[in-house]
Amino acid sequence: MRDRNEPSAAADPAHGTGEREMKRRWVKVLVVVVVVLAALFVAADRIALHYAEKEAVALAQERYGYGAGSTDGFTEVSIHGFPFLTQAADLSLDHVTVTAGNFTLDTTAGAQGDHLTVRRLDLDLYDLAASSLTGRSAGANLVTGRLTIGYADLSGAVSRLVGAGSALTVAPATGAGGGQEAALRITGTWNGRPVDTAASVAVAADELELRVPVLGGLRYAWPVPLPQNINLTAVRSTPEGLQLEAVGHQVVLGR
């Protein structure tokens, strides 16, 4: 028979301390499990994101030729927003950026020596939706973009196109551009004669067109490989080069 003065197990301080220690251990284990699961989810999310961006780069190079035609060509795709897996499960992406550069364009006429290098292309794609995870096409509600073409590259293309031993330099004209046409100045030699003449570049749909009235009425157009429903809307002559603006709505990608 237990002595009435003997403390019960419930009142035993050592027993209460043991329960508290057990609870603390369970809390610690739970925290560790949550941290590990979160880390695994983030790792899986980043792996899936990297794979998706890599596939998008391959598709952009295959479909639009970005990064092609030059040893230093490049293409990068960044899918923004976290977590990626949630967006992928919904077949919807909020914002994707595509950056490419040092790829070449050829004229519609296929003239000899007509290659023109695009130094940089930036596209911002918003509200993308795909029909399936395995599909190679998607749609974007809005796309905005910018292309930069260096004057040195344009000078080389013009010199090759007009021929006759030309050594021509293309430079921005004063107060040039802002709308669908930008003024340029071409200087140098053509057919043994000095040249100092006005020229211009105009944009419409997916093409830029160079116009040089004095040099035999030279007029060449370069199509720019852009996703369906994106149009070139403006061109400006800046100190860094020709800058072309692009906008598209209900854009179809990958087809």
Image: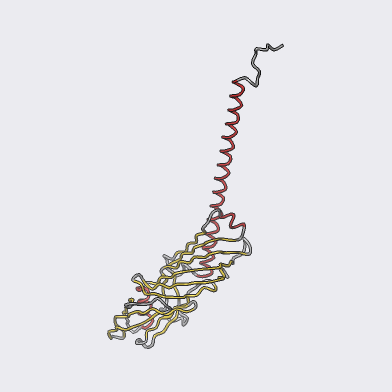
Colour mapping used in the image: secondary structure
Where does the N terminus fall, quadrant-wise?
Answer: top right
Q: Quadrant of residue 27?
A: top right
Question: How far across and how far down the image is residue 14, in percent?
Answer: 59, 21
Considering depth in this image, is 29 or 54 the residue closer to the camera?
Answer: 29
Question: How far across and how far down the image is residue 232, in percent?
Answer: 47, 75
Where does the C terminus fall, quadrant-wise?
Answer: bottom right
Q: Single out the residue that lies furthest toward the right.
A: 1
Q: Quadrant of residue 215?
A: bottom left
Q: Quadrant of residue 132?
A: bottom right
Callout count: 0
Question: How far across and how far down the image is residue 44, in percent?
Answer: 56, 50
- Left or right, 44 with reference to 217: right
Identify the residue shown where x is 52% and y is 61%.
Answer: 95
Question: How far across and how far down the image is residue 139, in percent?
Answer: 58, 67
Q: As displayed, is residue 7 above or below residue 129? A: above
Q: As displayed, is residue 217 above or below residue 70? A: below
- Left or right, 56 with reference to 150: right
Q: As displayed, is residue 185 above or below residue 248? A: below
Considering depth in this image, is 163 or 154 the residue closer to the camera?
Answer: 154
